[in-house]
Image: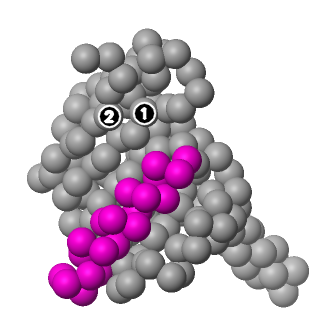
C-alpha cells in the first residue's frame, strides 16, 4: 500500500515539474510564444502595467519544455521585475486544444499570440492563424480578447 501511495505521489510531483497539470484560474492573461527576448520584454511590461492593480497571473504557453522555459525566464532576471504578478509556464503545441486548455485559455481575459521567429513570414502567419482558428472554433476566450502578431500585412 505504501508503495502505491509513494508511486502516486511521485507521479503527481513529476506532473507538477513538467507542467502537465492545467492552470486553474480565470480572468488571467495568456501569452502564446516561443522563448525570445520579445517574450521577456512583453512579460516585463505587463508586470509593470499590472503592478498598480496588485499584479496578475500570466500563463505562458510555449512549445519548449517547461524546464527550459523556466530557465529562460530565470536568465531574463524575471524575479527582479515580476512585482506582484505570477508567471506560470506550460508546454505544448498551441494549435492543439489540449495545450490551450492547460493554460485555461477559455477563462482568460486576454490572449496574446506572438509570431514564431526563425521561419518565413508566411509560415509564421500560418502557425499564428491556425492557433487563432483553434481558439475561435471553440469560442475561446469566452469573455476575453485576442491580440495577434502577424508578419504579413
- Which image quadrant for residue 74? bottom right
Magenta: predominant secondary structure element?
Answer: helix
Residue on which disc 1 sits:
115
Q: For the residue labelled by badge 2, is the local secondary structure a helix, a strand or a loop?
A: loop
Does residue 92 show up? no
Residue 129 is left or right of residue 90, and the answer is left
Give me the residue at 32% from left, 34% from top: 149
Residue picked out by circle 2: 149
- Identify the element where label 1 is drawn: loop
Q: Is residue 74 visible?
A: yes
Quadrant of the frame with the C terminus: top left
Is residue 53 rendered magenta in the image?
A: yes
At 43% from the left and 58% from the top, the residue drawn is: 41
The quarter of the picture where residue 70 lies is bottom right
Q: Which mark is residue 57?
A: none
Extreme residue in the left direction: 143
**Image quadrant where one finds the N terminus:** bottom right
| Image spot of residue 76 (x, y percent) | 59, 66
Q: From mark 2 to mark 1, how far is it between C-alphas? A: 6 Å
- Callout 2 touching callout 1 (CB < 8 Å): yes
The residue at the point 49 percent across, 59 percent down is 40
Q: Is residue 8 left or right of residue 90?
A: right
When the figure is inspected, residue 139 is found, relative to residue 38, above or below; the finding is above
Residue 89 rendering spot, x and y as whole percentages: 53, 61
The front one of 103 and 60 is 60
Image location of residue 101, percent across then percent down: 40, 49
The crowd level at tag 1 (other Cα within 10 Å; few <14, some 14-19, many 20+) is many
Q: Is residue 130 left or right of residue 90?
A: left
- Residue 149 on the magenta segment: no
Instruction: Please state the extent of the stretch shown in magenta in the rendering.
Output: 36-56
Above or below, 66 relative to 26: above
Amino acid at each position: 500500500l505504501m508503495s502505491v501511495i509513494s508511486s502516486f505521489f511521485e507521479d503527481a510531483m513529476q506532473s507538477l515539474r513538467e507542467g502537465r497539470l492545467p492552470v486553474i484560474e480565470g480572468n488571467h492573461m495568456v501569452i502564446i510564444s516561443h522563448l525570445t527576448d520579445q517574450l521577456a520584454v512583453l512579460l516585463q511590461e505587463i508586470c509593470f502595467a499590472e503592478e498598480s492593480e496588485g499584479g496578475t497571473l500570466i500563463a505562458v504557453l510555449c512549445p519548449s519544455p517547461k524546464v527550459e522555459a523556466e530557465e529562460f525566464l530565470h536568465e531574463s532576471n524575471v524575479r527582479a521585475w515580476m512585482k506582484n504578478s505570477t508567471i506560470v509556464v506550460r508546454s505544448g503545441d498551441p494549435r492543439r486544444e489540449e495545450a490551450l486548455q492547460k493554460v485555461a485559455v477559455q477563462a482568460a481575459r486576454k490572449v496574446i499570440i506572438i509570431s514564431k521567429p526563425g521561419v518565413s513570414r508566411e509560415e509564421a502567419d500560418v502557425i499564428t492563424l491556425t492557433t487563432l482558428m483553434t481558439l475561435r472554433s471553440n469560442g475561446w476566450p469566452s469573455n476575453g480578447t485576442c491580440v495577434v502578431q502577424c508578419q504579413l500585412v
